[in-house]
Amino acid sequence: MKRTSCMAVAALTVLTLAFAVMNRGAAEASDEDVFMYRANPNLLVVLNRSASMGTVLPSSSLDLDGDINQTRSRYDLALKALFRVLNADGDKHPTYLTSTPGEVSRVASYRSLLDVEDEVFLSQRIGSLWFDNTVHVSTSAPFQVKSPPTTPDDPPYGSWSYLNLWDAVYALPPIPASGTTVPFPKNEIIGYFSHAVSTPAADNSASCRPKVVLLITDGSDVASGSLSSMVLDETYSMFILGIGVETFGNRNRLRRLITRQTSTAVNESSDESGG
């Protein structure tokens, strides 16, 4: 049986991209950004869609979801951040000259910016999971992969493309008007990556494929519950785009998801260092 090679090179880390999301142009890789890994990573976007994400942002005119009751909300900014992640090469709209849409009437015309070149640029096989009062796992392919005998490491990744992922998330119903956010869905994230090992087809590179989590949240998912029940082990790389995180405690708990520090009490009155 022929063994699948799992050596690949990427020119941009997810962390670099995460910093590039917020009002920067296309990131250019430097020597420090270039790193090698044994197979293209599985990147899981974990999106908070709870009622707290409907909180209005001050001094913002952003409206991407078209919900008149939640205009200028945290969720509008979350959608903008997600679009920028998927528009990995930073292409700009030919008319509006930006890499992300700013209002609902322009979203459709920005879709063409999400193309195979983004997949080549980022080289991440992306899946999505979202949560509100409960956790929702997509019933479509867990990550963009091709069916054998073609390799799952060469873009384009098939019909479950970056554009399709955006369309699936953007088509979700309005976020709940009320309700308690479920805790950070650690177990569902672990299960999602496990499911991807054999679905939709066996992944011969699974043992050497990095597992990356990008959490987009306002911190309501870490407001309650023990850190030990939330923190993923070191086989996962964790990155967070925090949107409107209001309390020191929630900011610090999000930091702990990255630093994996669970042995000491969380500081509720000031920002902790690190993360």
Image: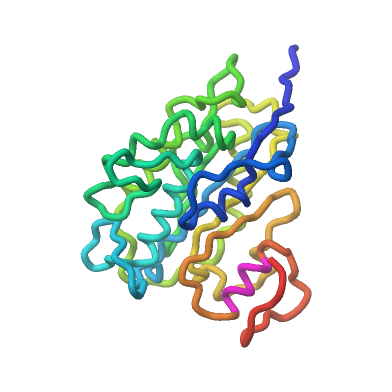
In front here: 208 or 120?
Answer: 120
Q: In the rendered structure, which segment of residues is drawn in magenta?
A: 249-256
In front here: 52 or 57?
Answer: 57
The quadrant of the rendering that contains the C terminus is: bottom right
Which residue ends up furthest to the right in the rendered image? 263
In front here: 87 or 91?
Answer: 91
For residue 216: magenta? no
Q: Please state the horizontal and vertical placement of residue 172, each as a whole percent of the image.
A: 33, 50
In the displayed structure, would residue 208 be above or below residue 272? above
Which colour scheme appears in the figure? rainbow
In the displayed structure, would residue 151 be above or below residue 107? above
Which residue ends up furthest to the top in the rendered image? 1
From the viewer's perspective, tell me whether residue 262 is left or right of residue 148. right
Q: Please state the horizontal and vertical placement of residue 230, each as a whole percent of the image.
A: 64, 64
The quadrant of the rendering that contains the N terminus is: top right
Q: Please state the horizontal and vertical placement of residue 251, each as a whole percent of the image.
A: 59, 73
From the viewer's perspective, tell me whether residue 101 is left or right of residue 257. left
